[in-house]
Image (spheres, rainbow, N blue to C red):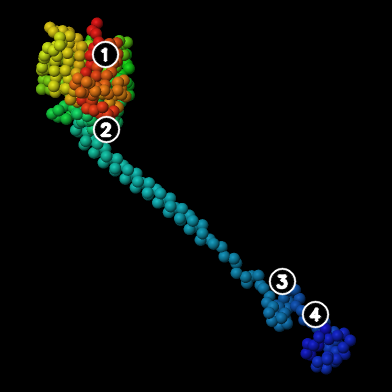
Amino acid sequence: MFCSHCGQPLEESDLFCSKCGQKIEEFAQEKVQDKPQQEESLPKKISSADPDASSTNESASLAYPYYHAIDPSAVPPKKKNRWVIPVVIAVAVLVLAIFIVGGILLYMLITTLTLEETTNISAVSQGPAVVNGKELSDYLGLTVEDLKNGSGVLLTEYDGTYTNLDGSVMVTLNESTGLIDMLVASDRDVGFTVCGVSVGMDREQAKSTAQAYVSDLEEYEDMIAGQNGEEYFAAYYDENGIINYIMYFTYSEDNSSGTNVSVGTGIWYIGEPLQEVWDFFGTEYDVQNQQGKTFFFYPAQGLSFATDDMEYTDQSRVSYVKMSDGAWFSDEIYIGMSYEKILLFVDLSEIYQDETTGEYLADYSMILEGQECYGTFCFDSADPTASSVKADMVLESLE
């Protein structure tokens, strides 16, 4: 309870304010009398149906200055974002139009580039046809790069002869033109064919297949051979009739040395008639009689062949072969290859020094098409990395 005059806290038993002296009874009476008036002065709830609503509102405003009656019709409606949907539609249409126009332009660009490329290809095709594939005869007369690019074969060059890593493909070049004049597939089938024939094919199938490529085809004792003009085909087979060596090459009088070296593999001719040597290397050779043998020397190829017949004929058999100066011993081995690498293909003895000649030699022996052969490799030192300088092979006996 407080004094209405000064606000001093009062006790109920106080008759006068201890601060201002105001009589408490008068205040209490005023308080009791004022209470109904305050209750009457409170505004009544206004009904919209009350006809005296306006006057009531007016009196309420006078009694309570901060009171305002709210007219629902005077409240502005809530705004709606009606612009959102049209904008979204417009953006979607724009994006769709961009995709359509971009697609059309891209199609026109691709079409133009394709047309230009086709035109360029047509222009190029007026020249020599580009060869692709693993049919080796197609590359005769082309470059080594044509062969590499067209077939995917990896070739390593040595003294004008190119071979792949395992020696199953071999290529030689014409000395004057630098173009391929011989291609050979041997030992194993690695996916290449020569006139449709592959290594491992049987003799009858090979003959039938090659007839589609070679018009003049004949069968001999151990090979199928034929020619088209100055292009020659030969496929050799073993005692079981299985193809193990195929070649395709050119030969003409102005290239009388034949293809370069290598079918020139020395051991290829051991036990064969002299006629095969002459057919391949020609008849321009030096001939000598030594130690009861007749020797035929081909210096350009680094090869020499010998027969036991002093009075030889074209059917006299080759019983001895000597290889030097970069000649090929076999399809995998050439003179100049190191001792370590030759060991991968031939079982050699350790290198030793000959007491008489002082040469560093390693011996070997092998069975070649059922025939026992032996010989030596000569190296430039006793080191395992030493390079070979020459080799020979002797046929143990002729049947």
Q: Are marks 4 and 1 in contact (CB under 8 Å)?
A: no
- Residue displayed at 80% across by 93% down: 20
Residue 206 at least partly seen: no
Callout 1 amino acid? Cys
- Disc nearer the start of the sequence (4/2): 4
Q: Secondary structure at mark 1?
A: strand
Which residue was labeled with disc 1?
373
Q: Secondary structure at mark 4?
A: helix
Other residues around mark 4 within 10 Å, as few (<14) / some (14–19) / many (≥20)? few
Other residues around mark 3 within 10 Å, as few (<14) / some (14–19) / many (≥20)? few
- Residue displayed at 29% across by 10% down: 370
In terms of depth relative to the viewer, which is nearer, 245 or 51?
245
The reply, left or right, for residue 23 in relation to residue 108 is right
Other residues around mark 2 within 10 Å, as few (<14) / some (14–19) / many (≥20)? some
In terms of depth relative to the viewer, which is nearer, 106 or 124?
124
Q: In the image, which disc is placed on residue 39?
A: 4
Which residue was labeled with disc 3?
48
The residues tagged by marks 4 and 1 sit, at their Cα atoms, a distance apart of 141 Å
Which residue was labeled with disc 2?
149
Dividing the picture into quarters, in which one does residue 306 lie? top left
| Foreground disc of the pair 2, 1 | 1
